[in-house]
Image: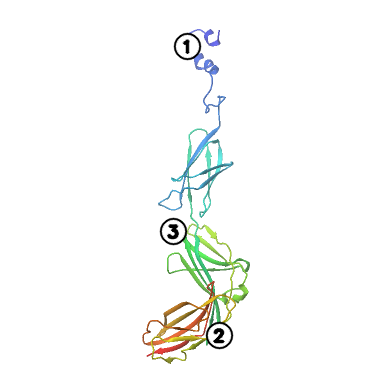
């Protein structure tokens, strides 16, 4: 006879059923520490969104737990879940290409699921980058030849181009850094840097040295571009022949001529016509992509009466260029 049945009295029997008889019963609940099926596990649910409101759900984000390894991917709603993981305190890390890594610390207890939200900051990146050396010849003042570096970068950001705070051009091995200026179209950053501003004092001495852009957004996250080097500084300068000397022309569509140029690399010519208005110079025409064997070009549309300057430049396949001295003419 069992111990429970051996006890007499309604009160005693009730007491035994509340204690001893339950002791003998099987424990199947995995949340019951007394059960042979007990598991000390919990559930972590979460969502990953963009950094700024209105928050966008981000899919395809890799979420990792440490200690682990536990890995999940967010769905179209930005949701992820880790079920039946050991009760512990975890470092939660969210990773997606083009975004800064985000981490959080979450304690996962036994029992009800816990919820966490991670917000990823989109990193700025370069859509288009042009770095060109420029050599300009002039009549006066000394030095007669000027060299500068022109940089133009189109920047994008998953959080919008307004999130791009600063763009720096750097030469790490020289400890050189300068800020590009925002202007023109949204996300466009440019700078024209005279060679005297560089630690080497000459563009030619920068050949082979790695350049890079460092991009910073409003939240302070930064992204570094891959390094690149300058390809060429064009030493040769073309010579503008005719018209010059402020010649008065009867034809408002003049033919502009220059000396033949022979170089051991691909190039084209660029002709620029500047109109002089009081103390202001305004670009009137720009003709580009003229073949390397050419020595002249005719102005297509008639020029209005006025005073003009023009130059001819060599432009290589990388955008590096070298320009002639300015010469002028007058259309009466």
Q: CA distance from mark 3 to mark 2?
A: 44 Å
Q: Where, quadrant-wise, is the C terminus in this rendering?
A: bottom left
Position in image of residue 160 (x %, y %): 44, 58
- The residue to which callout 1 is attached is 11
Position in image of residue 235 (x %, y %): 58, 80
The tag earlier along the polypeptide, 3 or 2, is: 2
Name the residue at the front extreme.
Answer: 293
Q: CA distance from mark 2 to mark 1?
A: 114 Å
Q: Where, quadrant-wise, is the N terminus in this rendering?
A: top right
The residue drawn where x is 53% and y is 66% is: 168
- The residue to which callout 2 is attached is 144
Position in image of residue 200 (x %, y %): 62, 74
Residues 295 and 213: in front is 295
- Dot 1 and dot 3 residues touching (CB under 8 Å): no
Residues 237 and 35: in front is 237
Q: Quadrant of residue 133?
A: bottom right
Q: Dot 2 lies on which element? A: loop
- The residue to which callout 3 is attached is 160
């Amino acid at each position: 006879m069992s111990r429970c049945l051996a006890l007499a009295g309604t009160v005693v029997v009730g007491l035994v059923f509340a204690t001893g008889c339950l002791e003998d019963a099987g424990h199947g609940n995995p949340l019951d520490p007394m059960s042979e099926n007990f598991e000390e596990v919990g559930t972590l649910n979460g969502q990953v969104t963009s950094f700024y409101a209105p928050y966008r759900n981000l899919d395809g984000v890799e979420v990792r737990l440490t200690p682990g390894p536990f890995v999940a991917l967010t769905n179209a709603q930005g949701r992820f879940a880790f079920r039946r993981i050991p009760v512990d305190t975890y470092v939660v890390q969210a990773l997606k290409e083009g975004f800064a890594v985000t981490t959080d610390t979450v304690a996962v207890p036994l029992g009800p699921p816990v919820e966490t939200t991670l917000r990823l900051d989109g990193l700025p990146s370069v859509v288009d980058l042009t770095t060109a050396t420029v050599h300009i010849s002039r009549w006066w003042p000394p030095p007669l030849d000027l060299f500068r570096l022109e940089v133009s970068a189109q920047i994008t950001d998953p959080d919008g181009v307004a999130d791009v705070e600063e763009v720096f051009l750097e030469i790490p091995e020289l400890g050189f850094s300068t800020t590009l200026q925002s202007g023109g179209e949204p996300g466009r950053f440019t700078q024209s840097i005279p060679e005297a501003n560089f630690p080497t004092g000459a563009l030619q001495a920068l050949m082979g040295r790695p350049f890079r852009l460092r991009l910073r957004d409003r939240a302070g996250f930064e992204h570094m571009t891959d390094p690149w080097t300058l390809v060429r500084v064009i030493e040769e300068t073309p010579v503008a022949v005719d018209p010059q000397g402020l010649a008065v022309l009867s034809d408002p569509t003049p033919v502009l001529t220059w000396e033949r140029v022979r170089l051991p690399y691909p190039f084209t010519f660029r002709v620029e016509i500047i109109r002089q208005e009081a103390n202001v110079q305004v670009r009137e025409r720009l003709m580009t992509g003229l073949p390397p064997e050419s020595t002249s070009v005719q102005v297509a549309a008639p020029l209005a009466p006025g005073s003009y300057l023009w130059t001819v430049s060599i432009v290589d396949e990388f955008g590096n260029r070298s320009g002639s001295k300015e010469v002028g003419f007058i259309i009466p």
